[in-house]
């Protein structure tokens, strides 16, 4: 994005020069008195007028009204349900911006967060990880509403900034074979006795199965169950799961059928999962992300690696094809049991040319990590850290505390056992929130003795403002 507005270009006072894009995909401009104006639908380098609907003492917010100078990066949205108009789908925010420019914006968000929040600048900026711009979303929560005034059932995402469900007939970020189910699902729900008590459908696609988790507030009658079975028979790959209450009640409508799973072919790993498990939304990007993370990690058969926030083993099992020993750490015993099961299944299928290293799993409250617990899990040559949006502040702070104890044992009394423990030489940190990554990078660089060797953006969610990223931290010797 190299366009510029020169100072010699003069516009009437009510026209605004858009300078940048914020994390909500709003154009950011300033009035002559310095007041910030956030403009939905406006793009950097455009000159626009805005219909202001919210005013505060130092900022305003509105929607683009007219465009006097249009950005060369503005494109026609790929989906008819995208827009700023009433009833527009709120699932995407950036379809009007060229996907290449979206990547540039998100890369800048990552760099700005690292510097402004963490005072950290990466030695190397990694090339962004990109993939298909459409048909990538293999996980979604789709709302269901019977709208009496319209005389129809709506199945789709919420409208922009609204609790209403958008009147969607197609969705271009869902895989085409799933988008094609939206109208048949409307017809199905309309025909069911329980139509009024079905608030949502959770979607999870594997490599060969489409799992649909139907939330139902009341028990389903035999007639409705028969309709679900008929729908699954008619639409190839569809598998119904039922959720009568909390997430722990989710179960298959009928046992049997093909397993919900995805593969990581580069590493020979097969990953079974349940539709309510956390897996990456974009499987195309996930495969590339795992591959790059492991290349950056550079584990060898002489090294021990710890995978913090290991989940089902998305990184742990591929790491086990390269390292000497792996420890996967997660927050719950139930998830650790699932990780262990996935490892056992892959161990039974391992190829002689790529044996899996000895791998163990342990449950830890990673949001209450301490130096003592860190020492308990032993030294490792390298770490892979993949936390939720909250980040890994307790983990990196425990690491920093141990470093500070070595620097000044008088001011910071050593934790028992610290003399036999050593920090990892390299940390690869995968993040879904650039703000918490920046906060943790601040601790690693300024308190724990690391340098940020590299950082880059991962376009896991094209057309949305969501920023995924990764960073590499190397111990300063």
Image (cartoon, rainbow, N blue to C red):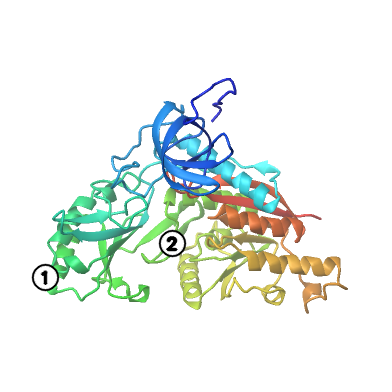
Instruction: Please identify the quarter of the rendering in which residue 97 is found.
Output: top left
Q: Is residue 142 above or below residue 371?
A: above
Question: From the viewer's perspective, is 111 left or right of 170?
Answer: right
- Crowdedness near tag 1: few (<14), some (14–19) or many (≥20) residues, C-alpha within 10 Å: few
Q: Quadrant of the N terminus?
A: top right
For the residue pair 145 and 27, the one nearer the viewer reads as 27
Q: Which residue lies most toward the right here?
A: 410
For the residue pair 228 and 144, the one nearer the viewer reads as 144
Numbered tag placed on residue 271 in the rendering: 2
Q: Quadrant of the C terminus?
A: bottom right
Instruction: Please identify the quarter of the rendering in which residue 142 is found.
Output: bottom left
The residue singled out by tag 1 in the image is 223
* Residue drawn at x 64%, y 68% as measured from the top left: 394
- Crowdedness near tag 2: few (<14), some (14–19) or many (≥20) residues, C-alpha within 10 Å: many
Instruction: Please identify the quarter of the rendering in which residue 8 is found.
Output: top right
Q: Position of residue 268 (x, y in %)?
A: 48, 56
Numbered tag placed on residue 16 in the rendering: none
Where disc 1 sits, the SS reads helix
| Residue 132 visible somewhere in the drawing | no
Q: Position of residue 334 (x, y in %)?
A: 47, 76
Where disc 2 sits, the SS reads strand
Q: Which residue lies most toward the top here?
A: 8
Q: Is residue 345 above or below residue 20?
A: below
* Residue drawn at x 56%, y 55% as measured from the top left: 431
Q: Is residue 12 above or below residue 137?
A: above
Mark 1 or mark 2: name the one nearer the start of the chain. 1
Kindly report which numbered mark, 1 or 2, lies closer to the viewer in this rendering. 1
Q: Is residue 316 above or below residue 115?
A: below
Q: Position of residue 35 (x, y in %)?
A: 56, 41
Q: Position of residue 472 (x, y in %)?
A: 66, 52
Instruction: State the separation of the CA atoms marked 1 and 2.
Output: 35 Å
Question: From the viewer's perspective, is 164 left or right of 105?
Answer: left
């Amino acid at each position: 994005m190299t366009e510029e507005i020169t100072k010699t270009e003069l516009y009437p006072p009510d026209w605004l020069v858009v300078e940048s894009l914020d994390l909500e995909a709003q154009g950011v401009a300033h009035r002559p008195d310095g007041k910030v104006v956030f403009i939905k639908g406006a793009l950097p380098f455009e000159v626009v007028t805005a219909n202001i609907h919210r005013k505060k003492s130092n900022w305003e917010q509105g929607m683009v009204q007219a465009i006097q100078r249009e950005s060369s990066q503005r494109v026609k949205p790929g989906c008819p349900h995208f827009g700023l108009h009433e009833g527009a789908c709120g699932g995407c925010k950036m379809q009007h911006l060229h996907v290449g420019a979206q990547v540039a914006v998100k890369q800048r968000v990552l760099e700005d967060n690292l510097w402004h929040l963490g005072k950290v600048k990466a030695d190397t900026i990694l090339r962004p990880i990109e993939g298909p711009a459409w048909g990538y979303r293999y996980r979604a929560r789709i709302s269901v509403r019977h709208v009496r005034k319209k005389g129809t059932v709506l199945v789709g995402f919420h409208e922009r900034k609204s609790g209403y469900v958008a009147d969607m007939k197609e969705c271009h970020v869902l895989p085409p074979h799933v988008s094609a189910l939206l109208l048949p699902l409307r017809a199905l729900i309309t025909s069911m006795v329980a139509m009024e008590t079905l608030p949502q459908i959770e979607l999870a696609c594997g490599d060969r199965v489409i799992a649909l988790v139907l939330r139902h507030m009341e028990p389903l009658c035999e007639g409705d169950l028969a309709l679900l079975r008929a729908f699954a028979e008619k639409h190839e790959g569809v598998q119904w799961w039922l959720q009568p209450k909390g997430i722990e009640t989710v179960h298959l409508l009928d046992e049997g059928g093909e397993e919900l799973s995805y593969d990581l072919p580069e590493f020979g790993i097969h990953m079974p999962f349940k539709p309510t498990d956390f897996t990456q939304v974009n499987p195309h990007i996930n495969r590339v992300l795992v591959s790059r993370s492991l290349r950056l990690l550079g584990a060898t058969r002489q090294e021990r690696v710890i995978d913090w926030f290991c989940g089902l083993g998305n990184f742990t099992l591929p790491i086990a094809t390269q390292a000497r020993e792996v420890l996967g750490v997660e927050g719950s015993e139930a998830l650790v049991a699932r990780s262990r099961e996935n490892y056992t299944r892959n161990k039974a299928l391992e190829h002689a040319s790529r044996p899996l290293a000895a791998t163990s799993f342990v449950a830890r409250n990673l949001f209450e990590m301490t130096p003592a617990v860190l020492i308990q899990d032993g030294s490792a040559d390298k770490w892979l850290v993949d936390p939720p949006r909250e980040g890994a502040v307790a983990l990196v702070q425990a690491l920093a505390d141990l470093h500070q104890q070595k620097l000044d044992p008088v001011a910071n009394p050593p934790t028992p056992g610290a003399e036999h423990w050593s920090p990892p030489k390299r940390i690869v940190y995968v993040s879904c929130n650039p703000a918490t990554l920046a906060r943790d990078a601040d601790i690693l660089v300024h308190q724990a003795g690391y340098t940020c060797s590299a950082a880059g953006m991962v376009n896991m969610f094209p057309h949305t403002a969501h920023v995924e990223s990764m960073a590499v931290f190397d111990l300063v010797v």
